Amino acid sequence: MNRKTKWAVALLALSAIGQPMWVTQSFAATKIFPPITDAAYQKECGSCHMAYPPELLPARSWNRVLGSLQDHFGDSAQLDAATQQRIRDYLVAHAADNAQNEHAFAIVHSLRANETPLRITATPYIAGIHSAVLDPLWGGNPRPKTLAECGVCHLQVQNGNFTMRKFTVTDEAFRSNHLD
Amino acid sequence: MPQHRPAPIGKHATTGKVIEPMAPSVNAKRLSNRADIEKWLLRNCKWTLGRECTPQEKGDVLVMIRGR
């Protein structure tokens, strides 16, 4: 085997085994997430806020949320141990890093390995998408008090559908006189 | 003393999520599940008082809500 052939063989071998896993997986480029299938999650978490699609946070975040329910953003969301474990299992199984969804993939990869946000809107990908609405100077409509209720803008979110959105951007929002 | 009647529909203070009426006279599903009652009394007592409620206190709250 001459030198050139050796290189060719080596390259071929590399391209076969060096293929990153995610290239071979198919990811759905959809903002429509599967419906919530766990009744306990829907009931327990959905009574104070929308039961968010588990695909919107990585498993380590869900574990952190479920581990701190005594102080859940200032409220007690304490659950009995069995229900808590069941909901944790469901969320982790469908978490962003276990989902075949491009947006879930983008959420995971917008985070550093040592970052474990509790809020969906604290992930850089989601925060970036919503930067206009998160801007305190946002003059559009609606002007949500918080981003906790996705349905204020995403009108079909009860079906896991984030494609429909309702907001208006006025010319004024783009006039930067407040930045002078 | 003003009459604190339960509003027909409430709102979560932080998230703004719509909360169905609390009073069983308006919403038959309320106070119908023992586990749910215990869960919310535990959470809300801890949040409000920093401790669990006594049986007397829990009873008082239930009587109040039932009377609405």
Image (tube, helix red, strand yellow):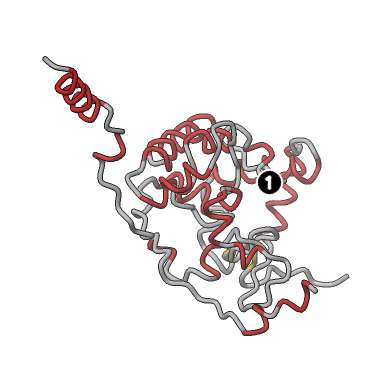
The reply, left or right, for residue A51 in relation to residue B47 is: left
- Protein chain holding label 1: A
Callout 1, which amino acid? Phe
Residue in the picture at 38% in, 36% down: A93
Residue in the picture at 37% in, 50% down: A102
Residue A19 percent location from the top left of the image = 27, 32
Quarter of the image containing the C terminus of chain B? bottom right
**Residue A9 versus residue A85 in the image, above or below:** above
Q: Quadrant of residue A48?
A: bottom right
Q: Secondary structure at mark 1?
A: loop
Quarter of the image containing the N terminus of chain B? bottom right
Residue A50 percent location from the top left of the image = 52, 57
Q: Which residue is mark 1?
A: A73
Judging depth in this view, the residue of B54 and A164 nearest the camera is A164
Q: Residue furthest right?
A: B1
The reply, left or right, for residue A109 in relation to residue B48 is: left
**Residue B26 versus residue A48 in the image, above or below:** below
Judging depth in this view, the residue of B49 and A61 nearest the camera is A61
Residue in the picture at 61% in, 61% down: A147
Q: Quadrant of residue A76?
A: top right
